[in-house]
Image (tube, rainbow, N blue to C red):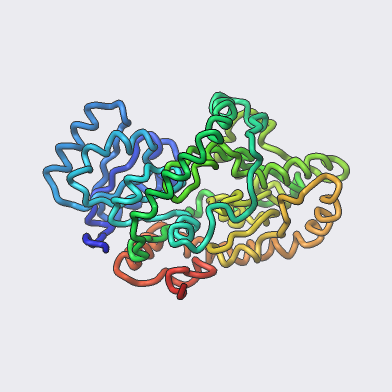
Amino acid sequence: MVKVPLSIQHSLWVRGDIICRGQRNAISETQGLRERGAKIFLFKGANDQESLKELKELLWRTDEHVVLSWLHPAELKALQPLLKDRKNFSLLADDWYIHPYWYMREAEYLIFRKYDGIAVRMGRAPFLTGGRPPVLLDPRADISWYPLLAAALRPAVLAAAPLMDAWQWWQRRGEEIDPARLLYFPFAIEPGNVPVGTGEAQYDFSNTGGTLGVWVMRDAYAPFHHSFANLYRDRELLTDAIAKWENRPFRFYDCRREKRLLPYAEYTRKNQQSRYCIASGGLHDATVPKYMEYACVGTPMIGRSLPYEYPWLDDCLFPVDMLAASPRTIKPILEQALDCQPKLRQNCLNWRERLLKLYDLQTLLDVVQEQADGKPVRPGYLKKDLKLEKH
């Protein structure tokens, strides 16, 4: 049962300073909350004792509701002693499966960026809806310290999985799910970040996103045995299959060859220069901003749609069974996709202004507040609202 009413502008928003100074969406969201009148505290990290002391004094001087957002798991762990007795907080979860379960259980409201978190928590969908990842992790798509460490630890995860999965089952059995505390807050988009592309396309198909999605599963509703597995396996298969036909005859761009993270301006330019961008939410069908970023610059997508969010997406996407993608079978599919591209691009352009209005930050903050006040999600955001359906 929800005990504390949530007010967007009358809450204290505790946000991670590291993410909020370096991540484009987090920066604009912080500014938007300030414009709305919300109080902001930028937490400077788990090892910053001065920031911890300042926040502790602030929390015990006020009984304002706290909303936690854009915080790393280590930062949440450092804040837990401050909130253990005080409570009166909500959690805004992006990759909800990596958040410590204590927060997911104790928060007054769970505010999900990705509707799959609501579907899984309500028992209406499995954690993975798009297939299973390989048993072991191949880190070659991104040779850096974290994928290499994840690949090395993957066998240990599999060995510990029966015990950890049983522990997660024990955690879940003691939690009563209240749909009223599960709120949906999709990603916002700013017009200046998604200018429409002009000129002739340089690439037929492009991959401008990662093909390696690896996390530690901390929430009790995300099976531990998927820790350090590649949940972006579907993207990887389609990208690799298209790459085999590069220059035979398809023009292809793959950001993995850059061996660096593309600056946002360059990322946007590559999207604009492409007839199609490869897109999916991974095997867990998680919402990612790329869907909107591609559509709003006028570039349709090739890949998999989403089961719950973005009812407009099917107008802007050429569907492909990514797990079945192989160099042997993909060429006629790509030829068909190019035949459909002009219509899908026009669909993207037709949707652009509506998307910019639907996903304006202040509009989305209103959508969250309405849900906290007991209203359903406004039309236009979901293909189906599971909280309105009888189960």
The location of residue 219, given as percent across then percent down, is 42, 46
- Location of residue 4 with respect to 211 vertically, above or below: below
Q: Tell which residue pokes out farthest to the top in this image.
A: 145
> Quadrant of the rendered structure where residue 178 is?
bottom left
For this view, does 339 lie left or right of residue 361? right
111 or 162, nearer to the observer: 162
For this view, does 388 lie left or right of residue 355? left
> Quadrant of the rendered structure where residue 292 is?
bottom right
The location of residue 48, given as percent across then percent down, is 28, 27
Q: Tell which residue pokes out farthest to the left in this image.
A: 61
For this view, does 346 lie left or right of residue 145? right
Q: Tell which residue pokes out farthest to the right in this image.
A: 248
> Quadrant of the rendered structure where residue 257 is?
top right
The location of residue 344, given as percent across then percent down, is 70, 62
The location of residue 151, given as percent across then percent down, is 59, 29
218 or 257, nearer to the observer: 218
Residue at (29%, 36%) from the top-left corner?
43
Residue at (65%, 66%) from the top-left corner?
315
Any part of residue 266 in sight: no
Q: Tell which residue pokes out farthest to the bottom in this image.
A: 390
Residue at (35%, 52%) from the top-left corner?
32
- Location of residue 41 with respect to 175 vertically, above or below: above
